[in-house]
Image (cartoon, rainbow, N blue to C red):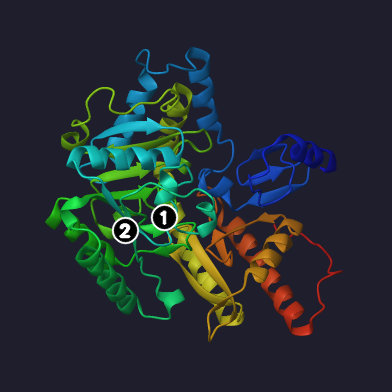
Amino acid sequence: MGDLLRRHEGSVAPMLAFDTDIHADHAEGPWVYDADGNRWADFACGTAVANLGHNHPEVIAAAKAQLDRLAHAGCVFRYDSIVELAERLRRITPGGIEKFGFANSGAEAVEAGVKLARYSTNRQGVIAFRGAFHGRTMGSVAYTTSNAKYRENYHPILGSVFVTAFPHPYRWGMTEDEATDLALDELAKKFKHEVMPHNIAAFLIEPVQGEGGYYPAPQRFLQAVRDLADDHGIMLVFDEVQTGFGRTANWFAAEHYGIRPDILVMGKGIANGLPLSSYGASAEVIDQWPVGAHGTTFGGNPVACAAAAKVIDVMEPLLPHARDLSKRAFERFDGLKARHETIGDVRGLGLMIGVELVSDRATRTPDPGAMDFIASYGVAHELIVISCGPDGNIIRFIPPLTATMDELDAAIDVIDGALTAYEEKVGNESVGGDRPVTSQL
């Protein structure tokens, strides 16, 4: 690993942040292996991408078959895999989403979705929600407020973007209703003091905030935003880049709410590791885009589309299992919360679970040190977990949908052991340096 790290630091741009220094040689299912045969359960899923686990054989076979026929088209000619994927997406996306465009990354899909909203409404303003993560390109970073570091040294950013509150009940020390009322009041003041609704093209929102802390939107809040969009002719754009493709144990988080977006943005798990993203809308909306109003060279690549079509086929029968895993995970984490003072809150939807770590429950003081300890302990015990939240104090628990119940339990057992070791260390000021490392997976 030392030689690879040296070569990496000598040749790869340093701004890329890696959660571990594991040298991955190959991967299969939930497991990632190094060249020496050591293995780790990847409960980060490649940052919520490998929802079917790594190298799913049916997905890989579909990609290989397409690669043997046609690897690239670049919008020069038409091909079947993009059509087959669009037809499958039409079947699984919320009602009214009928036609789809494709891109390479979530950020690109977000930008396309906002461009479509602006074009179809002939308005320029966008309302985004504090704590959101929508990407780091020069356009999407204007909508990203999960952490100020993503904007550092990039001002001025895209104009006509108005940021308003997203309800964070736990962080604000409020009930869900109190947090919803506060956020809706701020949105009302936004319209009263900063921008008239008829200037707004889109509400851009994650139904569950991801990087910002794994906060599900309260039902009443999301419904109020939908109602405001209807009242004022504003496009409601759901960023389901992280929440899509089974991550919440439904195809999309919108299904949990029964709320219809006008534009749906997708990515991450769509092709289980191949670079692909998508955005969809009704035919009435998307057909307003004339030829040439938007485009891409690599978006909708034939190989990635073939893989994504197979992902949908394979994932469909797994969704009930994902719901069973989710129920079990929440039960286990609620039990851990009862025994570990370091856990302040457990929240999320499906298999998108945030476990917030605090140094003081009464003050809800974030404890990023606990997260660092748990992540390091996890690597020593064959488990990879990563963080989220502006303070880096939230366990982002995102196992593959293909995990067995035993694998899920074993991973949570490791986290339980890590919490115990950390609390002993904090209590005694010196514990854990020579603890035996024994796998629990």
Secondary structure state at the residue bearing disc 1: loop
Check the picture and name the quadrant holding the N terminus. top right
Do labels 2 and 1 touch, CB within 8 Å? yes
Q: Residues within 10 Å of mark 2 (few under 14, many from 20)?
A: some
Could you tell which of marks 2 and 1 lies nearer the N-terminus? 1
| Rendered position, 16 above or below 409 | above
Side (left or right) of 314 relative to 43: left
At x 54%, y 70%, the residue is 356
At x 23%, y 60%, the residue is 225
| Rendered position, 211 above or below 267 | below
Where residue 248 is drawn, which disc sits there? 1
Side (left or right) of 355 relative to 308: right
Check the picture and name the quadrant holding the C terminus. bottom right
In this view, the residue farthest toward the front is 156
> In which image quadrant can residue 76 be found?
top left
Q: Which residue is mark 2?
A: 256
Which of these two is toward me, 117 or 243?
A: 117
> In which image quadrant can residue 377 be found?
bottom right
